[in-house]
Image (spheres, rainbow, N blue to C red):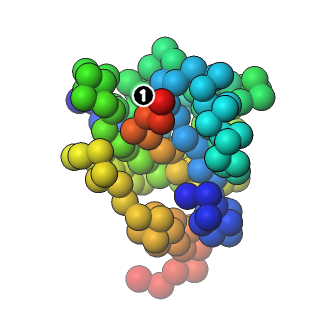
């Protein structure tokens, strides 16, 4: 399991939010901390 | 997390939830639960795989995982649940964010 490596740059990603706008991790650089939550699934 | 969302914002932090559900399912779940934070559908598993949330376990359900990334884009904390209910509390996450925010001050004496 390739868990994310701590104290290194987190992998950049880009996904569309619920309004269809692209969201990139790097959008938050220099601005906010990000708490990334991978949930159990809610279906 | 919805209740404590303001506490996360107070710590200059954004919550982003990622899951392989499709945008439609995400949207209706978000609306019916009135969630204020960001939800990102990842139906291709692209981000899930990059962050190591194991896809094989999908048969048993995905195990929860959380990663805190600071403002420089560095992954500072990661928790991979050993069970479906193995999730750190919001208090724990908020304390970690406090530590991360504090170490950003230049004038910290060691």
- Seen from the viewer's position, the closer of residues A2 and B26 is B26
For residue B3, side relative to residue B96 (left or right): right
- Residue B9: x and y in percent read 68, 63
Pinpoint the chain carrying mark 1.
B
Name the side, left or right, on which A19 lies relative to B93: right
Residue name at image x 30 percent, y 24 percent: B58
**Outermost residue, bottom side:** B109
Percent position of residue B81, x then y: 28, 47
Give left or right: position of B108 versus B53: right
Q: Can residue B41 be seen in this view?
A: yes
The residue drawn where x is 60% and y is 26% is B25
- From the top left corner, tell me how far across and down residue B52 is, in percent: 33, 31
Q: Quadrant of residue B55?
A: top left
Looking at the rendered structure, the secondary structure element under dot 1 is helix
Q: In which quarter of the image is residue B57?
A: top left
Drawn side of residue B3 relative to residue B56, left or right: right
Q: In this view, does A27 lie above or below B67?
A: above
B79, above or below B24, in the image: below
The quadrant in which the N terminus of chain B is found is bottom right
Residue A13 found in image quarter: top right
Give the residue pinned by disc 1.
Answer: B48
- Please name the residue shown 64% across and 47% down the image: B33
x, y (%) of residue B37?
Answer: 66, 48
Disc 1 crowd rating (10 Å Cα; few below 14, some 14-19, many 20+) is some
């Amino acid at each position: 399991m390739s868990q994310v490596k701590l104290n290194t740059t987190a992998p950049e990603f880009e996904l569309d939010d619920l309004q269809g706008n692209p969201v990139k991790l790097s959008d938050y650089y220099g601005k906010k901390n990000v708490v990334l939550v991978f949930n159990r699934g809610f279906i | 997390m919805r209740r404590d969302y303001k506490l996360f914002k107070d710590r200059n932090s954004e919550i982003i939830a990622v899951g392989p559900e499709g945008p439609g399912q995400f949207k209706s779940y978000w609306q019916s639960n009135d969630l204020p934070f960001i939800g990102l559908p990842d139906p291709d598993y692209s981000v899930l795989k990059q962050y190591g949330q194991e896809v094989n376990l999908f048969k048993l359900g995905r195990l929860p995982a959380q990663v805190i990334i600071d403002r420089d884009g560095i992954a500072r904390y990661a928790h991979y649940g050993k069970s479906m209910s193995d999730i750190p509390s919001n208090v724990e996450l908020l304390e970690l964010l406090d530590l991360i925010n504090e170490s950003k001050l230049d004038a910290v004496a060691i």
